[in-house]
Amino acid sequence: MSGAATVRVQAEPFDAAAESAALTQGRSDLGAVVTFTGLCRDEGGMLEALEIEHYPGMAEEEIGRVVAAAQARWPLGGVTLIHRYGRIAPGAPIVLVVTASRHRVAAFEAASFLMDYMKTSAPFWKKEHRRDGTSGDWVEAKASDDAAADRWARP
Amino acid sequence: MSGAATVRVQAEPFDAAAESAALTQGRSDLGAVVTFTGLCRDEGGMLEALEIEHYPGMAEEEIGRVVAAAQARWPLGGVTLIHRYGRIAPGAPIVLVVTASRHRVAAFEAASFLMDYMKTSAPFWKKEHRRDGTSGDWVEAKASDDAAADRWARP
Amino acid sequence: MKAVYFAWVRERIGKTEEILLPPAEVATVADLIAWLKQKGEGYDAAFENGSTIRAAIDHTHVKHDAAIAGAREIAFFPPMTGG
Amino acid sequence: MKAVYFAWVRERIGKTEEILLPPAEVATVADLIAWLKQKGEGYDAAFENGSTIRAAIDHTHVKHDAAIAGAREIAFFPPMTGG
């Protein structure tokens, strides 16, 4: 099962439903579609917005490499990965992963794998803008995200 | 984080996007939404349709118990589970799981857990109607589905 | 006690539900299956591999050693294939 | 060789990109970081915990012992926080 891969890095919001529909349109060989949407949290009302910086060119290439690794590892009928940059308000979507496969385990695992590597390997950085007007900090990378990515390393 | 739970057993198709939107509408405390859609495969063109039989009353109750178990185990901001019954054509959706949480691992694990238990514990049975007109067989339960559910058993 | 049947258990028995009045010595789900098998060919076919058949009492899964006393509705069905 | 900087590495250095012409003995990413640290306060602050800074050569992640020979573009940035 070789499927199409779509990778986009964009400032605009995305339509998760349309992306998911595009992946399964006219197909009757797929049994499972998993979508993951990452949203901007307001952190208990403290956050005014996130500013997402990225490395143009490398962001698309690195996501493409992670997607290719997922395709090599699981039999995917299709995969879509979109990451936004720029100013994102609380409640708004930041990242979308859609994976389609014959069986649910492949779709779940591939989506989870893609998100773990998006966190640790794709060149994006988040800065907080706070409601109280102070310039917020750059979000710090979490050791738990490295650990999540490491669990996919082959022995 | 205590969230709403929606459980429905219905013949009608569902709108995955609308269900997902309903779960996150007006919220800015959620960081992750996972949706799983299970589709009817045509099994290499052999299948005309699936006929899904269910146990009315118990189906809703059993799904409710599985959802409650997921809510007790992961901090979910909301969860929706819809399972269809009746005649389903290839390519059409059968089951929908939506989980929302602050963090992605909880949303992924809860959705995967819910699907594993839907497979092994919810009272639904699939019968195949074949394109060649013969009355197909009842789909057989898979040992791999039991194994998938067993991995969530606490030690 | 009402019995309800699903999927190929229903097809082999040839009915969706019926009222059962088993004798007092039929105490467990396993006892009830053994008693049902003697009711006719369809029942015997439905329960030929009796240990693989699942049972639920009043909408809750039960094992075959569960007591049936007080049950309002008992269901028999093959392993589930939803999802 | 073009150098590009992101996030707080960019902020501390005070520029988004520049052309670097390091001497021949600067052979690896680690060498280049040590050389950059001597260029001024901002560089010193950006690389004060040099081992935590990530590098990419021509859009591919590299470790600090990677050779820089032939690199067209080298990027320095903090650990990533996308997703």
Image (tube, coloured by chain):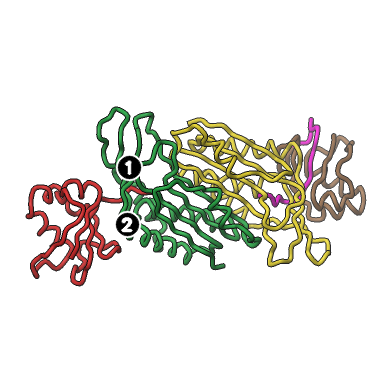
Chain colours: A green, B yellow, C brown, D red
Q: Secondary structure at mark 1?
A: strand
Identify residue for label 1: A51
Residue that appears at 43% across and 56% down: A8
Identify residue for label 2: A56
Label 2, label 1: how far apart the Cα atoms are: 15 Å
Position above or below: B66 against B88: above
Q: Which residues are magenta?
A: C67-83
Decide whether residue C82 is among the magenta residues: yes
Type of amino acid under label 2? Pro
Position above or below: C17 against B138: above
Residue that appears at 18% across and 63% down: D29
Position above or below: D77 against A87: below
Q: Secondary structure at mark 2?
A: loop
Q: Residues within 10 Å of mark 1 (few under 14, many from 20)?
A: some
In-image side of C67 versus C17 (left or right): left
Residue C52, visible in the rendered structure: no
Question: Viewer-proximal residue, C51 or D57?
Answer: D57
Position above or below: A131 against B107: above
Extreme residue in the bottom direction: D70
In-image side of B131 versus A151 (left or right): right
Question: Viewer-proximal residue, B76 or A119?
Answer: A119
Kindly identify which chain the residue marked by label 1 belongs to. Answer: A
